[in-house]
Image (tube, helix red, strand yellow):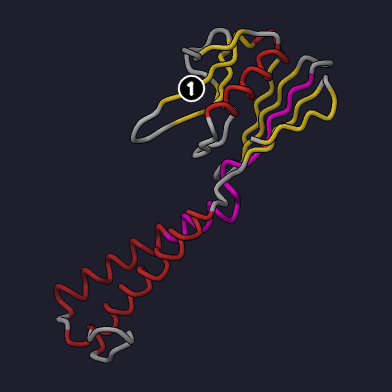
Amino acid sequence: MNSDLTSFDKIEQKIGGSRKISNYIIGGMLTIGGIGFLLASISSYTGRDLLPLGNPSTLLFIPQGIIMGAYGVIANLLNFYLWYLVYINFGSGSNYFDKSSKSVEIKRKGLFKDVEVKLNFDEIKSVKLDISEGFNPRRRIALVLKGRKKPLPLSGAGELKPLLQVEEEGARLAKFLDVNLEGLK
């Protein structure tokens, strides 16, 4: 979440989406694996080696070739889905806070359509820091809205920033919105 404090009455934060190096690596591995399983299945059916490694033409088509073909189809379906998410940059967007109009605008790219949330400052109860450490750590900033139990997350999914940076951004946002900051222990 990159904050741009060009003036003291507006804050705009850009949120990164699914275009991460880890998604490219997983997508590449899934592509290679899925194509490999399909080629092994076709090799066992035709009796010709289509892969440079191993000897898949010696496999029996039933049951090994069929199962490898199913693995290949499933891997390629997941592969297309992941590459589509990377292509549309799923989850990317922006947070825009305007003090002069007392409005908040949160935009994210969705799977089939974009999500846009518009709020007024008076609908915001507080800014919450959701911090959990351990095996699956989470450090995010969220808005607690009046009349809603679940907070509205502002940070991107999978962002793991240093704790001090998250606290500073949360404190700066709470001061800007003139609300309390929750979640610090």
Position in image of residue 120 (x %, y %): 71, 14
Horizontal and vertical percent position of residue 159? 53, 38
Q: Nearer the viewer, residue 159 or 106?
A: 159
Element marked by disc 1? strand
Residue 146 vertical placement versus 18 (above, below) = above
Q: Nearer the viewer, residue 153 or 139?
A: 139
Q: Amino acid at mark 1?
A: Asp
Q: Nearer the viewer, residue 8 or 154?
A: 8
**37 displayed left or right of 117:** left
In the rendered structure, the answer to whether residue 56 lies left or right of residue 6 reads left
Q: Is residue 96 magenta?
A: yes
Q: Nearer the viewer, residue 138 or 117?
A: 138
Query: Is disc 1 surrounded by few (<14), some (14 to 19) or many (20+) residues within 10 Å?
Result: some
Q: Is residue 160 magenta?
A: no
Residue at 71% of width from left, 32% of height from top?
Answer: 3
Considering the image in quadrants, where does the N terminus appear? top right
Relative to 137, residue 30 above or below: below
Region of the chain picked out in magenta, as a range? 79-98
Residue named by callout 1: 130
Residue drawn at x 55%, y 54% as measured from the top left: 86
Residue at 61% x, 8% y: name it.
180
Q: Is residue 166 above or below residue 145?
A: below
Residue under the point 69% across and 23% down: 118
Q: Position of residue 108 (x, y in %)?
A: 62, 37
Instruction: Please identify the quarter of the rendering in which residue 171 is found.
Output: top right
Residue 120 is left or right of residue 35, and the answer is right
